[in-house]
Amino acid sequence: MHLISISHQNSGSPGRRRARRRDGNQSMAIWIPMLSFLSSAIAIILASIVGTVISCLRRRRCAVGFFHPYTNDGGGGERVLWCAVRAVQDENPDLDCIIYTGDDASPETLAGRALDRFGVHLLHPPIVVRLYKRKWVDEKSYPRFTMIGQSLGSVFLSWEALCKFTPQYYFDTSGYAFTYPLARIFGCKVICYTHYPTISSDMVSRVRQHSSMYNNDVLVAKSIWLSRCKIVYYILFSWLYGLVGSCAHLVMVNSSWTRSHIEKIWKIPARIKRVLPLERPAGIPILVSVAQFRPEKAHGLQLEAFALAVNRLGPDMTKPKLQFVGSCRNKEDLERLQKLKVRASELDMEKNVEFYKDVKYSELVQLLGSAIAGLHSMIDEHFGISVVEYMAAGAIPIAHNSAGPRMDIILEEDGKPSGFLASNKEEYADAILKVLRLKEAERLEIAATARKRAEKFSEKMFYENFKSAIRPIFSGLNAPT
């Protein structure tokens, strides 16, 4: 029986082995065509990409392409766009200026917007290249991992832009650094004006400290494990950001804070130039807050501090007014504006607070001219052009004690203060009270010092610094590599 059993088992083994070989052969028969198909598809795609790039290189024109998908946001970034276009037109009138935008706009309407909203008169209207894939950079498309989602999405949008029109100079004015390697593949000289680094060491520090902010969810801040995961994500993203940013031939920044972060991450200090932002026409030196209704602008802090200051005023003092002036990009911004109005009512400040949405440049000048002080409360603002606007208009600035306002703007001039810095509601309220209680001569002295300091950031100075920075690129002499 024992021998029969062994013989039976042995006789079954070859059958099972043959069955396994048949299954393996069948699997190979399936996978080989699939791998062959995938290889062919990849080869075709790569050949198509290479063919497209070569075709675009042949059609490349001597022009400056400004990559600015949102030309209607009304913020400081759009102002820089139009001033950059004007500076290029001044420096080299023969260069065509191309605007890559997702907005349905004509050259004439964009030129009109530059004049109406920002007081920038273009020598001639720009050429408009309409982009239809702007959803790739819309933050709503990426509820999670927004930074990397928008960054990779910008590459697809830039591909659309460069395929439609390939310029000799690719100028990014919106901070889409991940597009720079692609622009170089298309044979472009890459220039960028960086308002604010996409990621900074300050952002990583807040995650390490479990600080909850608009860019660090409360759930993440409270969880050690989620915070560690986010730190790893930030570190990896920072490495990628440095890699793509280093592809720029020329980098322009508008503050010491931004420059220090960009130099640290991109590691191309020789190609980084600091140019100075623009002033607004000066008016008569009263409380105004100029900023888009975005979460990081912290309008709620300003409102709370203002209400606290008003309630601390003596009965013999006139109650001031706070004017919120800004634009709304989307539904969320409109909702924030409505919440501010509701909160003003809850604080019994309806008679003391006014709201101005999407005002024209001429109206903004009038509002600035009526202010004795200007509020700004964004943490780590790269520069803070509205702070300079306050100073140029004779309004004493009260800004957050960090980044641009602390390092570049609200500094002593000839040993005299040019404004006030604050970090929380109580400090803002104290600063507001100081301004309100100043004697007229004291207020005018600070306002005059602030205005003198604002001259260092004048429009003339901006144009001169801007043109000085781009001249080697456009002339082809001593161009950074």
Image (tube, rainbow, N blue to C red):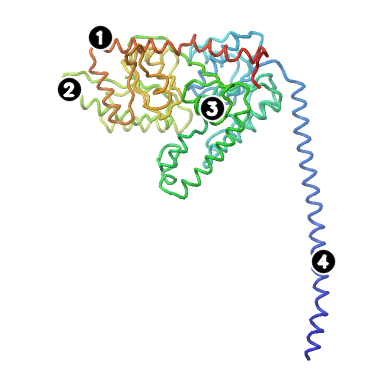
Residue denoted by label 2: 314
Q: Mark 2 or mark 4: which comes first in sequence?
A: 4
Kind of element beneath mark 3 = helix
Q: Amino acid at mark 3?
A: Glu
199 versus 105 height, above or below? below
Picture residue at 57% right of the left edge, 33% below the top: 241
Dot 4 surroundings within 10 Å: few (below 14), some, or many (20 or more)?
A: few
Task: Give coordinates of residue 110: x percent, y percent.
Answer: 56, 16
In the visual, does 315 lie left or right of 24? left
Q: Amino acid at mark 2?
A: Gly
The answer for how far apart the CA atoms under marks 3 and 4 are is: 60 Å
Kind of element beneath mark 4 = helix
Q: Nearer the viewer, mark 1 or mark 2?
A: 1
* Quadrant in the picture for residue 142: top right
Residue 21 image label: 4
Dot 1 surroundings within 10 Å: few (below 14), some, or many (20 or more)?
A: few
